[in-house]
Image (spheres, grey):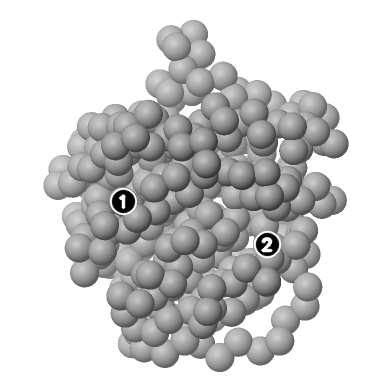
Amino acid sequence: MTSTTTPQIPAQATAPNGPAFADDLPEGFTQVLREVNGTLIHGVVGGSGEPLVLLHGWPQSWREWRYMLRPLADLGYTVVAPDLRGTGGSAVTEGGYDKDNQARDVHELLQVLGLTGPVRMVGHDIGGMVAFSYARLYPEQVHKLALVDLAVPGYGLEEIMDPASGGLFHFGLFMAPEAPELLFRGNEKAFLTWWFAKMAANSTAFPPEEIDTIAASLSGPDALRGGFEHYRTMLQDGRDNRAWGEAGGVLTMPVLAVGAEHSVGSYLARTLKPVVPGVEEAVIAGSGHYIPDEHPEALLALLAPFLA
């Protein structure tokens, strides 16, 4: 049965990977740190009602959702925003970064928090890949699924990551063993300043203080590797998703595909149609890739009626 109250969270140890940003928690939210699926997963929880899970992208953490946590909780949900394995306050592990295994991380976290009923799930970027795997693996436990500005492995990602056909260069770089860590270690702030200027259409979304915060989260021991490992499993993630689809798999729960005008746009919805025949499409005008930072109000306006 779904818990309708915020779980009681005992005191926990300091997050193992970088700062936990406790001072930035919205009112009514608290940190959690739980051992699940062979690792430690950190996140924030607040509100009451049916569970709503928010999964972030790279190079961010739960803080990606900071503008939306309290408004979503006020709609009547217990909002859970975990840090994906190897990011934010979650432990960096040697392996286990394939999206199916990370879906198990999230599933076990919800179980230990006592949130065992059907969930609403929103995933952006790599978090959307994990959310797609979650819906594949636990379809009866997903009430509604919203995917925000990504391409799903096996269903559109491979084209976007192919520079020979005009795709984005960074996928191959981030997949390479050791190389990106060597290039970016000590240069996190400079890289992120360039990265967000390139990927975000709203120039005010990532002020210097926010870039400093994200850079700090990437400067801990092994923190860069924890982020890049998410990319190093994407080819296997695509094979896993395609095998499921070729075996007749489809998602039948309501699915909303949200693209940014200056990023994937309608591409996400179009490429999902073979396995999500009823997918709903929306595009956020004027936004780059980082919609929750650039246009949180517009995203909330789409999510509120869809999730209800």
- In the shown orientation, is residue 255 left or right of residue 188? left
Q: Residue at x 21, y 69 (%)?
A: 308
Which image quadrant is residue 277 in? top left
Seen from the viewer's position, the closer of residues 264 and 127 is 264
Which residue is the site of mark 2? 90
Which image quadrant is residue 245 in? top left
Seen from the viewer's position, the closer of residues 173 and 188 is 188
Seen from the viewer's position, the closer of residues 187 and 239 is 187
Q: Residue at x 40, y 21 (%)?
A: 159
Give percent across and percent down for residue 66.
Answer: 51, 62
Note whether residue 147 is visible.
yes
Note whether residue 223 is visible.
no
Q: Quadrant of the N terminus?
A: bottom left
Q: Secondary structure at mark 2?
A: loop
Q: Residue at x 68, y 71 (%)?
A: 23
Give percent across and percent down for residue 131.
Answer: 41, 54
Distance from disc 1 to disc 2, alpha carbons, whole Å, reads: 29 Å
Give percent across and percent down for residue 267.
Answer: 29, 30
Q: Residue at x 71, y 86 (%)?
A: 11
Q: What amino acid type is highlighted by mark number 2?
A: Ser
Q: What amino acid type is highlighted by mark number 1?
A: Ala
Q: Secondary structure at mark 1?
A: helix
Q: Is residue 210 above or below residue 263?
A: below
Seen from the viewer's position, the closer of residues 176 and 81 is 81
Give percent across and percent down for residue 185.
Answer: 82, 36
Mark carried by residue 298: 1
Q: Is residue 215 above or below residue 65?
A: above
